[in-house]
Image (tube, rainbow, N blue to C red):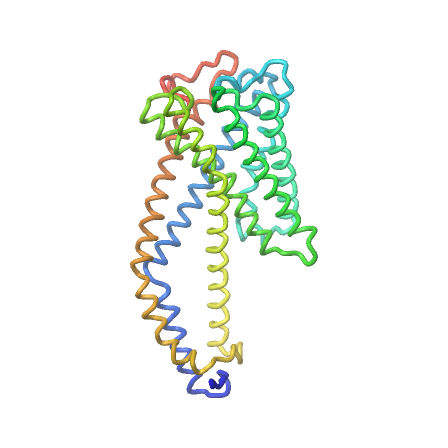
Amino acid sequence: MSTAVGYSSIPEVNHSLQKKEAKTKTSSSTITTQILQYEWRIFLATFAFGLLALSIYMISFYVRSILNNNLAAWDITFKGMYHENNSSNIGLAVHFIGASYFVLFAPLQYIPSFRRRYTTLHIWNGRIALLLLSITALGGIYYVMKVGISQMPEEYQFSADLAMYVFGISTLLCCVMMYYYAAISKPKRIDLHKLWAYRLAGLIFGSQMYFRLIFIVEGAITGTKALESNIGMVSTMFVLWTFVLPFLLLGDIVYKMQTKAEEEVEEDSLLHKQNNGETKQLLDYDDDVVVDYSNQHQNENATSWKEIGTVLTYGILIVIFISTLIIWTIYSWLPYCTVNQRTGELPSWAKGSYDL
């Protein structure tokens, strides 16, 4: 039977395990890990720029048209979006206004330093963002109930409408669960609040980039808009039915990665304090653990190819993501930010570009 030993009870074991721990920490801080960290930072910076560009586009085009009482201008970007003398326009106007706030200010909620330094602002910004996003989802659902995705041919109408209902209800579910675990649950479950927050981020932000990537590829292949060819119809339906669940799961993956990173930081901090004499007692170790502990370095080496594959995969995805964002910004967002909403005329430098 194993005998549990404490660091303070056997100094020799204490010293030996400290050295092994230091070695393990060093081996885990490999080049691949550092590259992954840089890739993550590049992704976040690009993502932040993308959200800023998207919010500018929504405010300068859709909100501007609402303030100017020129809702018919919506057809400039997507023909059939505006319906004269129909209450569906109210639902879509609410949708655009709420989404503009969410896209512009909600990303602050995911910045750890913002949450720590401005806790009160974090709480109230979150409440406003969740409220407006809920209204946004309800506005979108109301629009679909009234007129459906009218740009779709009749044979695709039901499936497209159903996909939008799933998207809207999933968004509402994320909002409700986030608020419940942060404000209603006793005790509060901030861990589950964060999990649903990452699911929401994957659903809203990730799906938007997914839409753009698929439509850009489609336009490049067919030379047409999303709904102007049979291939376009198929790909549009593919997009509608494949972005909800995958991007909810993407939120789970990011949450687990972030949680693991935070745990590693806490472990490093604890070990640092122990080495400086600030912590006199760590968890007791079983002697079996001592025997097996030296094999951890070998196990990490065995997964090195997996790490390299992960680095390459993330690198390729980031390149695709950045390319998609640049193309979409140049060929769609910027032209419609400056379009003449009365005449529908694009700026001279953007003429010839198609609506993505």
Q: Is residue 107 left or right of residue 329?
A: right
The one of 195 and 51 positioned closer to us in this rendering: 195
| Outermost residue toward the top in this view | 343
Q: Is residue 136 above or below residue 115?
A: above
> Which residue corresponds to the image point at 60% horizontal and 51% vertical from the top-left?
193
The one of 62 and 219 positioned closer to us in this rendering: 219
The one of 30 and 295 positioned closer to us in this rendering: 295
- Residue 146 x/y as whole percent: 61, 22
> Which residue corresponds to the image point at 41% horizontal and 45% vertical from the top-left?
43
Q: Is residue 250 above or below residue 293?
A: above
> Which residue corresponds to the image point at 55% horizontal and 45% vertical from the top-left?
108
Numbered-mark total: 0
- Residue 165 x/y as whole percent: 57, 33
Q: Is residue 91 above or below residue 3?
A: above
- Residue 329 x/y as whole percent: 41, 30
- Residue 87 x/y as whole percent: 65, 20
The one of 339 and 103 positioned closer to us in this rendering: 103
Q: Quadrant of the C terminus?
A: top left
| Outermost residue toward the front in this view | 155
Q: Is residue 135 above or below residue 278?
A: above
